[in-house]
Every structure is written in C-alpha cells, then in structure tokens.
Image (tube, rainbow, N blue to C red):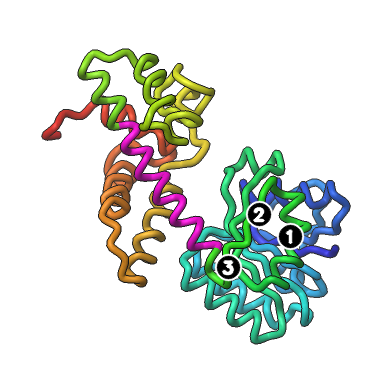
Amino acid sequence: MKIGFIGLGNMGAPMAANLVKAGHEVIGFDMAEVKVDGVTMADTAIKCATDAEVVITMLPNGAILRSVAADIIPAMAKGAALVDCSTVDVDSARAVASDAEAAGLLAVDAPVSGGVGGASAGTLTFMAGGSEAAFAKAAPLFEIMGQKAVHCGEAGAGQAAKICNNMILGVTMIATCEAFALADKLGLDRQKMFDVVSTSSGYSWTMNAYCPAPGVGPQSPADNGYQPGFAADLMLKDLRLSQQAAESADADTPMGQLAQALYAQFVESEDGKGRDFSAMLPRFEKRGRES
C-alpha cells in the first residue's frame, strides 16, 4: 500500500519504520524535522495524505486531530482509510469519523497499548472503533505494527476501550504503591509482599508485570530510576480523558476521579513530571497519613 503517516514522534516513527520494513511505501509528515529510515517526508500534511490508500495519524490530542483531519480529509481519495492511533477524547474520535465517512472515506479510531518498546518491536495492541469494512482495511497494517487488534465496535469504541483500560491501570498502580508503602511501615519485606500478593487475590498487572518496587519481580522502570516506560504525564492525560468521558456519559467514577487528582498533584505540584507513573511508590514512601 501507499501509506501516509502523520505524527512521527516516539511512537509514530517506529510504527512507520515497521511498515516500511514490511514493504509498504510510506510518506511521512511531522511538525518537527525528523528522519525515519525508508520514509519519504512530505512538507505538508495534505501532500502526505494525497493519493494514500491509508493515512495513519499519531497526534497529541483531540484538538490537533480535528485540525489535521479538517485539512487532509478533502485531499484523500474516496474509499481511502483514515486510521487514527492517537489517544484522544471519544467525542473528537467520533466527530472525525463522521466527517471522514461523509467524505466517502473509511475511518478507524485505533489507540494503542504497549508504549515505545511495543512500537519498536511491533508488539502493540490496537483497540479499534469503526465499521467492519474500515477495520478490515486497516487490519493487515495492525498485524505489522502490533501483535493484537480488537475491533471494539463503532466509531469511538476504540478510544472508549483505551481510556477505560487506563483508568483501571492508574487506579491499580496507586493501590499497588500504597500497599508497598504500608508494608514497609509494617515491617514486611518487599520480596515477601510480592511473593504473597503476586499469587493471591491482590494479583494485578501493576504488581506482577510492572512492579513499582525496585529489585522485586520482573525488570521494570523501578529498576531504572523510574525512567519512564509510561510517563506519569501521559497517565494524567488518560485519566483526564476518562473523567471527561465519564462526565459526558453521566457515569459515577469516584476512584478514577481520585486517581486523576493524585496524578495531577504528583505531576504538577511534586516531582512526578517526566518520571514513570510507577514513581508513585517513592512518593507514598515519603508521606505519612496527614501529609
């Protein structure tokens, strides 16, 4: 295929590179000056999208997605697919899909899970929303860039799945960090804590696969000074999206709301900016009940 790829940052660049390695022709565009092996760079998003069978976007937020979509949709050939892999608000995903479909395009919202490592290794998980025909058009590309793609439903369903998943992730990481900090104060060895919880009812991905305690469990950012695998800033972004969606849908999400407030405090008023989201553990270590 001839593929346009708009947004060649930490995630987009390795995703585009994997498409090139699989034999696709990729035309790229980014606001920054970037170079990706095998990707031909265009000087505008419109030129990137013109004549492409599929245009993939990986952008920072819904407002930018709407702006880029407004530029490129008129330039895309009827029957082409617009596949957005950004993590944005559900309303923006649905609005862009509606505009694309009105112009005779296929549209998929397909946010990803797996981080920069997954983007490089081609092991991302895609959560996709859109029609069956749109998903079928994008599926072969998902197979190259990732290890799993789930068609979650109509437009916006991919974003809904992503923010619900990451709300759970944010809440469970806080609970895991709180539990380790409490175990410390109770004199319980961290390894013993892990040995019990990882095989008991407290089992979770944040404990078993991404343990926030250095030297405990599999290798994780905690073993690298909390250099981000998934930055606290991005967790805050996703939690805010979850609460925006909850407000729009009139859903009661008190734990998600509290997690958002804690990550906002951590990132904006403490030392969490630029650190992994599991760095909540040293935060709780330093705090007492009233602090």
> What kind of element bears circle 1?
helix
- Whole-percent x and y of residue 251? 31, 66
Task: Pick the quarter of the image with the N terminus.
Answer: bottom right
Q: Would you say residue 31 is visible in this rendering?
A: no
- Whole-percent x and y of residue 47? 76, 71
Most extreme residue toward the bottom is 102
Q: Amino acid at mark 2?
A: Ala
Quarter residue 267 falls in: top left
Callout 1 crowding tier (Cα within 10 Å): few <14, some 14–19, many ≥20 = some
Q: Which residue is mark 2?
A: 149
Dominant secondary structure of the magenta stretch?
helix
The verdict on residue 172 being magenta is yes
The part of the chain drawn in magenta is 158-177
Q: Is residue 82 above or below residue 37?
A: below
Residue ID at (74%, 71%) = 49
Residue ID at (59%, 52%) = 112
Mark drawn on residue 153: 3
Mark 3 or 1: in front is 3
- Whole-percent x and y of residue 129? 59, 66
Alpha carbon separation for disc pair 3 and 1: 14 Å
Q: Would you say residue 149 is visible in this rendering?
A: yes
